[in-house]
Amino acid sequence: MRLFFRKKKAPELTGVEEAKKWINSDVLSLEKLRGKVVLLDFWTYSCVNCIRTLPALKDIWEKYKNKRFVIIGVHTPEFEFEKEIGNVKFAVKKHGIKYPVVNDPDRKNWNNYGDSYWPRAALINAEGEVIFDHIGEGGYDEIEKKIIEELVRLNEIDEESINNINDEMKQYDKSLSKETYLGTLRTKGFNSRVVCKPGTCNEYIDIGRYEKDKVNLQGQWNPDKEFIEFEGKDGYIALKFYASEVNLVLSGIGTAEILLDGAPLNKKNAGKDIYFLGKKSYVKVEGDDMYNLVNNKGDYIEGILKIIPFKRMKAYVFSFG
């Protein structure tokens, strides 16, 4: 979604003056970059919508990095674990990002730019004015056209020599499952009964009623504002969904078994983070990240996904594609 407004002075980057907050770059400021076209990309590494924008951003970077142009990925965490610079560095390396990235754990620049959504892109001209603002996936053909216009104006490129990004418009089924949070701050509740014992009320019993985008819990789970954490010996998370892809942000170190409609995943519907051992399907959790559990190769399906956790596994949010 493009936002329409008159040109305005771009707020200076604040709270990121320490070198340790920067990846792939020394400390940058908009004042130092005056005379260049700057694309600020507000993102976070466990956001599936942000991850989907990376191929277009990397392509733009490779085309114009030797011109008076720079991309700055302003990493703006949604969850506490995303504030850690070590996690951000790992994600930058994992996704092959070569342009400058700055970690903004306190969301100072997110707030200064009036952001509310991930991802968000702000294009700044050589005079330090925001000239284009875009929310969400897609739109990178428009963004590149604006970059071209500015670089042509600066006599950096010949407009006729540029081939635009083919930004294919994705058509999503309106019935596609919506992001489903598990932490108390944003959860819509669970299809489970809670059993209270002396000193605690964290034993969940799956009531057996499955509704799309409503989570069913079984076993001992400790709720937190951002996540639920498994504490028992036997239990699971179950979710009825409609999508082609299912992702889940997880934290911890261990292996969780994954079932779809009561059966292991197979090579047709398994996500990229699934591995097989014997006849069973698993995800190996090796830290705080988004894990791709189901990928039905573009075909939408309705099903019940079940995750059998390991002790102290934390689950944050489901996302879909």
Image (spheres, rainbow, N blue to C red):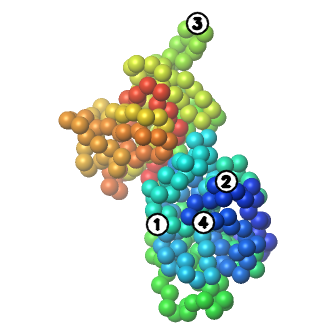
Task: From the image, tell me which residue sits under label 4.
Answer: 25
Residue 174 lies left or right of residue 278; in this view the side is: right
* Residue type at numbered disc 4: Ser
Mark 4 vs mark 2: in front = 4
Residue that appears at 63% across and 71% down: 39
Mark 4 vs mark 3: in front = 4
Task: From the image, tell me which residue sits under label 2.
Answer: 104
Mark 1 vs mark 4: in front = 4
Residue 116 visible (yes or no): no
Badge 3, how many Cα within 10 Å: few under 14, some, many 20+? few
Disc 1 to disc 4, C-alpha distance: 20 Å
Residue that appears at 25% across and 40% down: 276
Mark 2 vs mark 3: in front = 2
Q: Which SS class for mark 2?
A: loop
Task: From the image, tell me which residue sits under label 1.
Answer: 55
Q: Which SS class for mark 1?
A: helix
* Marks 1 & 4, CB-CB < 8 Å contact: no
* Residue type at numbered disc 2: Asp
Tell me where residue 156 appears, x and y as whole percent.
60, 89
On screen, residue 198 above or below 122: above
Residue that appears at 35% across and 56% down: 298
Label 1 or label 4, whichever comes before in sequence order:
4
Residue 74 lies left or right of residue 308; in this view the side is: right
Q: Which mark is residue 198?
A: 3
Disc 4 to disc 3, C-alpha distance: 54 Å
Nearer to the camera, 43 or 146: 43
Disc 4 to disc 2, C-alpha distance: 15 Å
On screen, residue 208 above or below 172: above
Tell me where residue 135 appears, x and y as whole percent.
62, 62
Disc 1 to disc 2, C-alpha distance: 22 Å
Q: Quadrant of the N terminus?
A: bottom right
